[in-house]
Image (spheres, rainbow, N blue to C red):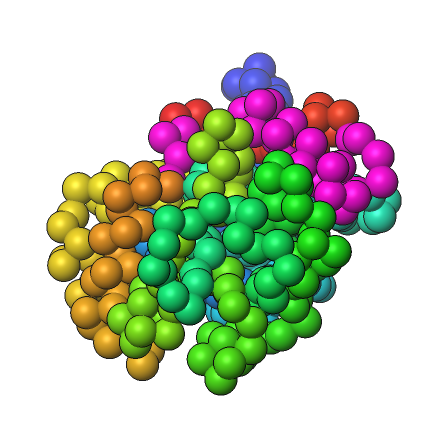
Amino acid sequence: MRKKSIVLFILLILSIISAILIINIKSETPTEEATPGQQLNVSLVSHSTVFLPFYVALEKNVFASYGLEVSVNTCSSQWDAYNTLLAGETDIILTGPEIVFFHLQQDKTEELVIIAPASNANDCFLLARKNDKPFDWIDLKGKVVIGHKNGELPQIVFEHILRQHNLRPFIDVHIINNLPPEMMLGSFQAGTGQYIVLSEPLASLAESNNIGHIVASLELADTPLPTNVFLTTSEFLSAHRTACQKFVEAYRLGIERTKELFPEEIALSVQEHFPGLQSNVLLKAVSRCKSTNCWPSSSCLTTKELTNLQDILLKGKEINEKIPVRKIPLESFPE
């Protein structure tokens, strides 16, 4: 009887120790908040048809099928989005990848992480008031062009193309780059400049209203570039890794759905993201965007894409020195 009591006492002690160990292990394990209903705040820098897979994933409940509740906020600029991310006011931003290089150049303590590419083609076009003859880039010499703001990829690529055609930006071609995005088309319509650089759906809107006509694309066919990426902070990624992975997987499915659906069905489903835009104009922009195949086939950026981008930034003197690609924080989720 005495031996039995001793055995029971030992078993009781072992059970208590095991329970304490389990509690300690759980308390030291980071909490993973990718449970159904996980909320993610995503900020965009504009409403563009190049973001169609994101809108499709929202409207076709793709994010919801992954247990994510995605809310969307539109910022006035990429720097506004960037600041909201660093301040913890948003979780993920959809913006140009150039901002990562600018961030690294400033030696900020907070680390930004690219979790996936969003697009790999430029949806920007050069429009002229008239399209009465075949366009040649030399036609821009001595002309006034309404461009984008300094430091934004469309403007950087535009200046790069000018240099490729032996045209010096701001010397051979006068570029207006201080207009807010919402004033660009109106200023052109009012008579400012002979050319303008517009993204979709504004390019289709200008054509539909006979304000301007597309004469060239800002696409660099021989130089693959990441034109938009999803960014978050290393701190958020560490605490919500599964949620980030599910977000990337859902976006990949959004790309597949966008490629499968007819333009008419896409335009109808994403109309609310382009308030005030006529359905026929949106359909034209959607059709053009689908035809360019501007979405990546992989969730991982390649070294070549990042190197190409950095070379353009260096040539344009947007960054002071070369940054080793290995220092650019990338997250690669299994596909």
Q: Residue at x 66, y 46 (%)?
A: 167
Q: Residue at x 25, y 39 (%)?
A: 256
Magenta residues, start to end: 295-323
Question: From the viewer's perspective, is residue 58 above or below residue 273?
Answer: above
Residue 109 picture location, percent across and down: 83, 47
- Is residue 312 rendered magenta in the image? yes
- Is residue 46 rendered magenta in the image? no
Left or right of 5? Residue 61 is left
Question: From the viewer's perspective, is residue 147 above or below residue 134?
Answer: below
Q: Is residue 37 visible?
A: no
**How many numbered markers are drawn?**
0
Q: Is residue 52 visible?
A: yes
Question: From the viewer's perspective, is residue 236 above or below residue 197?
Answer: above
Looking at the picture, tell me which residue is in the foreground, 186 or 127: 127
Q: Residue furthest front?
A: 133
The quarter of the picture where residue 192 lies is: bottom right
Residue 8 picture location, percent across and down: 54, 24
The quarter of the picture where residue 206 lies is: bottom left
Left or right of 20? Residue 46 is left
Looking at the picture, tell me which residue is in the foreground, 298 or 138: 138
Q: Residue at x 56, y 47 (%)?
A: 138
- In the rendered view of the protein, which quadrant contains the C terminus? top left
Residue 52 picture location, percent across and down: 33, 54
Q: Residue furthest bottom?
A: 190
Residue 309 picture location, percent across and down: 63, 35
The quarter of the picture where residue 39 lies is: bottom left
Q: Residue at x 45, y 32 (%)?
A: 221
